[in-house]
Image (spheres, rainbow, N blue to C red):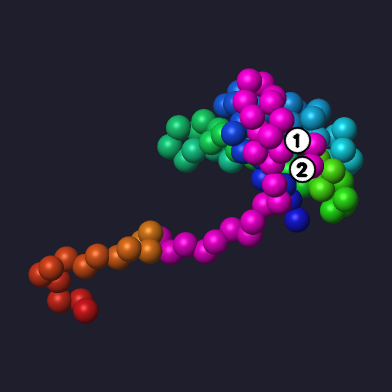
């Protein structure tokens, strides 16, 4: 399982996050998603730690904590939802015959 870390400053790097989370255990992996069009970080990250107890300790202390001028939102990451490429609200053209 991994940890979701939200409300991050856009300047945050993997090393910045690692320096915070390593205080609660071993950091296995960090992912900072970026916007496809701009390449800019999206303001959240995922952190994987060595054990559930390490993750729980980090979540307990860091959720709501102020860091780099922002109040962090830290919790267990939820599994990614499968979304179709149509965005879920397919609207057919009124004159289309492909029903």
Is residue 38 found left or right of 77 in the rendered image? left
SS at mark 1?
helix
Is residue 17 found left or right of 32 in the rendered image? right
Residue at the spot of label 2: 59
For the magenta stretch, what is the residue range?
60-85
Q: Is residue 10 above or below residue 56?
A: above
Q: Is residue 73 above or below residue 16?
A: below
Q: Residue at x 88, y 50 (%)?
A: 53
Using the image as rendered, state which of residue 27 and residue 56 is in the foreground.
Answer: 56
Using the image as rendered, state which of residue 77 and residue 39 is in the foreground.
Answer: 77
Mark 2 nearby-residue class (10 Å; few <14, some 14–19, many ≥20):
many
Disc number placed over residue 62 in the picture, else none: 1
Q: Position of residue 55 (x, y in %)?
A: 81, 47
Does residue 27 belong to the magenta stretch?
no
Mark 1 nearby-residue class (10 Å; few <14, some 14–19, many ≥20):
some
Q: Position of residue 73 (x, y in %)?
A: 65, 38
Whether residue 49 is visible, yes or no, is no
Q: Residue at x 38, y 59 (%)?
A: 87
Check if mark 1's residue and mark 2's residue have beta carbons within 8 Å. Answer: yes
Image quarter where the N terminus lies is: bottom right
| Quarter of the view holding residue 79 | bottom right
Whether residue 27 is visible, yes or no, is yes
Q: Residue furthest top?
A: 69
In space, the residues marked 1 and 2 are separated at their CA atoms by 5 Å
Does residue 76 belong to the magenta stretch?
yes
């Amino acid at each position: 399982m991994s940890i979701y870390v939200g409300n991050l400053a856009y300047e945050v790097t993997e090393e910045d996050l690692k320096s915070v989370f390593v205080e609660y255990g071993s950091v296995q992996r960090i992912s900072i998603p970026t916007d496809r069009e701009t390449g800019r970080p999206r303001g959240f990250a995922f952190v994987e730690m060595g054990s559930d107890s390490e993750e729980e300790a980090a979540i307990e202390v860091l959720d709501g904590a102020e860091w780099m001028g922002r109040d962090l939102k830290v919790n267990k990451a939820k599994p990614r939802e499968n979304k179709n490429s149509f965005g879920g609200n397919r609207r057919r053209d009124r004159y289309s015959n492909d029903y």
